[in-house]
Amino acid sequence: MSVSAQGYGPDHESPYGYSLHHVQLAIPAGSEDECRAFYVGLLGMAEIAKPPVLAARGGLWVRADSLEIHLGVEEDFRPARKAHPGIRVDGLDELAKHLEDNGVKVVWDDNFPGHRRFYAHDNVGNRLEFIQRDPSVPAEW
């Protein structure tokens, strides 16, 4: 039995081959340039072209490494304050410093055994979790 990619519990394969294609977050109409500055400029992601039929709706798609985020315009926008993507990173401390150096508040959370993580909010208030396995804790905890 192997340990899951998350680092705890047994791995499990379904008969369907699940994997994550993207995470969608809502943004207010007209905020694409601000979001581009945050996700592309600050987080270092690359903007990817949306299919023309979807581009007409507004929004923005970004990608880096194996993460893809779709930022979709929502008419009655409210930021996601509880729901959030959990974004696995390799350089957690470096990212936290980079965000703080650029005026983004970082809130550390020690309540996930075997992991180090912090929360931050994007430019429109959506909650983001950045997480890294703690190498000092055995994977099978």
Image: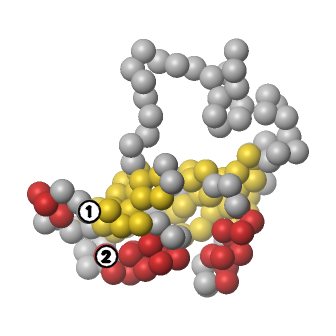
Q: Between residues 104 and 76, which one lies in front from this camera angle?
A: 104
Q: What residue is rendered at 70% in x and 15% in y?
A: 1
Q: Mark 1: which secondary structure?
A: loop
The three-letter code of the residue at mark 2 reads Glu
Relative to 66, is 106 above or below? below
User: Quadrant of the rendered structure where residue 4 is?
Assistant: top right
Q: Between residues 18 and 77, which one lies in front from this camera angle?
A: 18
Q: What residue is rendered at 42% in x and 24% in y?
A: 17
The three-letter code of the residue at mark 1 reads Ala
Pointer 1: what residue? 49
Tell me residue 66's x, y (percent): 49, 49
Q: Is residue 122 left or right of residue 29?
A: right
Give the spatial CA distance, label 2 vs label 1: 13 Å
Tell me residue 30's x, y (percent): 26, 79
Relative to 131, is 55 above or below? below
User: Quadrant of the rendered structure where residue 53 is?
Assistant: bottom left
Q: Is residue 18 left or right of residue 60?
A: right
Q: What residue is rendered at 52% in x and 63% in y?
A: 127
Pointer 2: what residue? 32
